[in-house]
Image: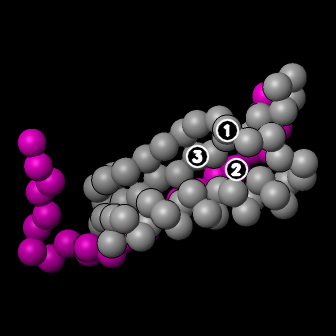
Amino acid sequence: MGLFHSKNANHELARYVDARYLSDPYKGRSQTNYVFTCGIVVISWRSTKQTLVVTSSSHNKILVIHETSREYVWLR
């Protein structure tokens, strides 16, 4: 297994993030989704319920930014 890149491909690392506040209102859990691409190739993705109960959509976004930033640093 491996990734194939042509010589002229754009190798820029890009991320796309989505946060859904209280996607499970009965348990108080929010959803975290992110995708990292290098050019047009997906190299990392995640979709999971957060382990913490958040009290606002702002708190939810902070947790998503933290989680995504950790993955970004690791990939770089």
Q: Name the residue type under label 3.
A: Asn
52 relative position to 40: left or right: right
Picture quarter with the C terminus:
bottom left
Whole-percent x, y for residue 52 in the image = 73, 42
Name the N-terminal-most of marks 3 and 2. 2
Asked whether residue 50 is drawn in magenta, I would say no
Marks 3 and 2 sit apart, C-alpha to C-alpha, by 6 Å
Name the N-terminal-most of marks 1 and 3. 3
Query: Is there a contact, CB below 8 Å, between mark 3 and mark 2?
Result: yes
Q: Where, by quadrant of the figure, is residue 50 drawn?
A: top right
Name the N-terminal-most of marks 1 and 2. 2
Name the residue at the top extreme.
26
Q: Which residue is drawn at the image coordinates 53% and 67% (left, top)?
A: 69
Picture quarter with the N terminus:
top left
Front tag of 1 and 2: 1
Q: Name the residue type under label 2.
A: Ala
The answer to which of 5 and 60 lies nearer the viewer is: 60
Q: Which residue is drawn at the image coordinates 11% and 57% (left, top)?
A: 4
| Residue 19's disc number | 2
Q: Which residue is mark 3?
A: 33
Query: Is there a contact, CB below 8 Å, between mark 1 and mark 3?
Result: no
Q: Name the residue type under label 1.
A: Thr
Marks 1 and 3 sit apart, C-alpha to C-alpha, by 14 Å
Whole-percent x, y for residue 72 in the image = 44, 66
Tell me which colouring the rendered structure shows.
one colour
| Secondary structure of residue under mark 3 | strand
| Residue 51's disc number | 1
7 relative position to 19: left or right: left
Whole-percent x, y for residue 74 in the image = 37, 65
Q: Which residues are magenta?
A: 1-24
Q: Which residue is drawn at the image coordinates 80% and 40% (left, top)?
A: 53
